[in-house]
Image (tube, rainbow, N blue to C red):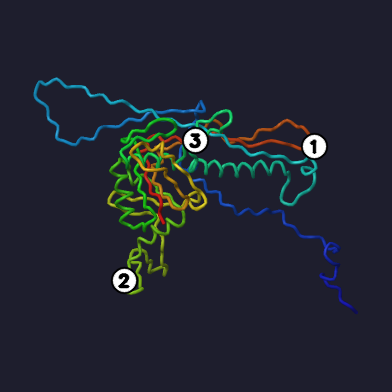
Amino acid sequence: MATQYTYDSGGSGTTTIREELADIIAIMSPMDTPLHNLLEQVPVGNTTFEWMVDEIATPTTVNAQLEGATPSAANRTRQRLRNVCMIDHLGIDVSDTQRTVEEAGISDEFSYQIVHKSLELLKRMEHNLHWSMYQAGSSSTARQTAGLMEWIAGTGQGRDAQSETTIAGISVPVEYSSSWYEADDSAFSEADFRDSVIQPAWRNGMQISQAIAMCGGKVKQIISDFSVTYGSGSSTVNAMFIEAEKKKKVLTVDVYETDYGPLSVALNRYMDSSSVTATIAAANLGSSAGGATVLTGNEVLVLIEPEFWQIGTLRALQYAPLAKTGDSEEGYVVAEEGLRCLNPIAGAGAGSIP
């Protein structure tokens, strides 16, 4: 008597065995949004929003006054800064038939697409806040906010050249600028990190213990390697990061202890791609600076004090329906926001790290 097996039930497309398709849709795409998680989101009432910065003068000499002398006034002029909100949206269009049929893992395709596109748009907005270069906008050119890299690298380059930097159409004086170090594609050492990134940021006014450093995987690994002490020949000893009791060797640095305070170091997926670039025009860097600055995604490192950075929100991420014009349901998800750098001194960084 011949035995019937499951694989004898017919060729491809003719089997009578019902398929087993789980009601699960697996998505592995990471949803890290560090700036949206770290920064306060504040409402703004216009596409262009402005704010003021000021500083308290640092004494460089001993000051003593005569008895009975009349004080002289030396008032400082506060500086106005600005940025714009940029719009981003994603469309949704699902046929009425598609919404009616029974699907695995989805009760309603249109509702699923609203959630899916909202998450996709949130990642795009995060990328914009990192890498957008300022555009005032017109009827034919979309507005673009001055993003994190433009504020830090732009004003930092200006400080290095002792020249005002133009951000969002306003000149940023040197005393309100970030600090920036160009590694120029040469080896990035611990001394470079300590003396050319952290120390200038502290001298500029940054509270290192309140700051966070962000970078991609390549630069993070360089920082983690600072913990390795090299011995003779090819042998290496990780003297600081061996947990003997757990029999575990830790080759990472999440908090970097400095003379200026502990600095948190975090991975940032939006700073991990060599295909992501941004160019700060030479015209915006002042007459004393060199040529245009090109930033490459996986070659940069930034430090920020989160309390001095905000996301200005004109329209929070939301869904809006479109008029029905056929046998389908249409709509879109949209958001309108921009980056507010309350004071560029609260930023520092380095570029061209090989």
Q: CA distance from mark 3 to mark 1?
A: 38 Å
Q: CA distance from mark 1 to mark 2?
A: 72 Å
Residue in front for this viewpoint, 112 or 328: 328
State the count of labels.
3
Q: Quadrant of residue 248?
A: bottom left
Q: Amino acid at mark 2?
A: Gly
Residue at image mark 1? 327
Residue at image mark 2? 231
Where is residue 350? Give x, y as percent.
Answer: 38, 49
Q: CA distance from mark 2 to mark 3?
A: 49 Å
Q: Amino acid at mark 3?
A: Thr
Q: Nearer the viewer, mark 3 or mark 1?
A: 3
Where is residue 323? Give x, y as percent.
Answer: 73, 30
Q: Quadrant of residue 96?
A: top right
Q: Quadrant of the C terminus?
A: bottom left
Q: Secondary structure at mark 2?
A: loop
Q: Residues within 10 Å of mark 3 (few under 14, many from 20)?
A: many
Residue at image mark 3? 145
Q: Amino acid at mark 1?
A: Asp
Which comes sooner in the sequence, label 1 or label 2?
Answer: 2
- Above or below, 329 relative to 248: above
Q: Residues within 10 Å of mark 1 (few under 14, many from 20)?
A: few
- In percent of the image, x 52 and y 35: which residue is there? 144
- In percent of the image, x 58 and y 31: which residue is there? 140
Where is residue 285? Give x, y as percent.
Answer: 38, 38
Q: Are marks 3 and 1 in contact (CB under 8 Å)?
A: no
